[in-house]
Image (cartoon, grey):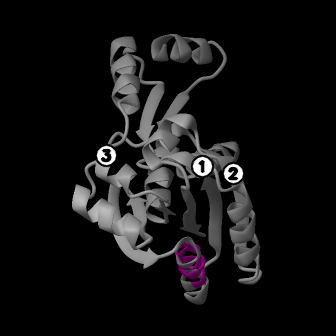
Amino acid sequence: MFIEAYKKQLETYSEVICLTMSKTLSGTFNSAMLAQTILEDERVVVIDTESTINGSAYLAEKTLQYLNEGHDSSEAAVYLEALKDQGSLVFTVDNLKTLFDNGRLSRLQATIGNILRIKPILRFKRGVLDVEHKVRGFQKAAKYLVDEAKNMIDMGKKAIIRIAFVDRSIEAKELEHEMFQLGENIEVKITGVISPVVSAHVGLGGLGIYLAFE
């Protein structure tokens, strides 16, 4: 499918840039690279966004803007490397069993955490997922996300926020409202429901942001 997609685009365009979700989460990058190798066409460039969900979407959006300014694929690849360092996904899950199933927590930790209503704050940056913090209750988890944006603004940077969720549309709107209260040096957008494939790993109750700066 990648080979056919490359061929079709090359009928119209002089270059093809394929951006994939992080190779640490999916085999998509390897498939895209294998297709490029089989095709043996240097006009096809495959780049691992080292992100996913609204993170990958934001990087694709910025890359498109950059290319429309007259830059070529090699310049875009360098530009993307810098962008990756400027953002990360910060999110929480509702049921710790999801993290147990993914091997991030032991069964005991997941069970105790659910009983105590502990919500982990996870950060996914440059293809690496870490449990960054733990809070009690969903409201404190949402506050943590807002505080992360505020810290970035306090450092004099423009904060870029992309909000995604599994089944928390109301909470996403509330989070958007809280973000808007941080002032003018922020750009906030709700990107919508997380795709089914990723939602299966995040679990119900998932809510998070892609947080970047410009």
Q: Pointer 2: what residue?
A: 191
Q: How would you rate the neighbour count of disc 1 (Cα within 10 Å): few for under 14, some for 14-19, many for 20 or more?
A: many
Q: Pointer 1: what residue?
A: 166
Most distant residue in the front direction? 115
Percent position of residue 206, x then y: 54, 55
**Based on the displayed image, in which of its 4 quarters is residue 135 positioned?**
bottom left
Residue type at numbered disc 2: Thr
Residue 131 or 52: which is nearer the viewer? 131
Inter-mark Cα distance, 2 to 3: 27 Å
Q: Pointer 3: what residue?
A: 101
Percent position of residue 162, x then y: 64, 59
Residue 4 or 77: which is nearer the viewer? 4
User: Counting residues from the N terminus, which is met first, the one under dot 3 or under dot 1?
Assistant: 3
User: Closer to us: mark 2 or mark 3?
Assistant: 3
Residue type at numbered disc 3: Asp
Asked if residue 101 lies in the magenta stretch, the reply is: no
Residue at 56%, 61% (x, y): give it.
208
Inter-mark Cα distance, 1 to 2: 11 Å
**Based on the displayed image, in which of its 4 quarters is residue 134 positioned?**
bottom left
Please give left or right for residue 135 compared with residue 100 in the image: right
Percent position of residue 56, x then y: 53, 47
Q: How would you rate the neighbour count of disc 2 (Cα within 10 Å): few for under 14, some for 14-19, many for 20 or more?
A: some
Residue 169 or 162: which is nearer the viewer? 169
Helix, strand or loop at label 1? It is loop
Residue type at numbered disc 1: Val
State the extent of the magenta-drawn residues as a range: 141-150
The quadrant of the image that shows the C terminus is bottom right
User: Closer to us: mark 1 or mark 2?
Assistant: 1
The reply to whether residue 51 is in sight is yes
Percent position of residue 92, x then y: 48, 63
Residue 106 or 33: which is nearer the viewer? 106
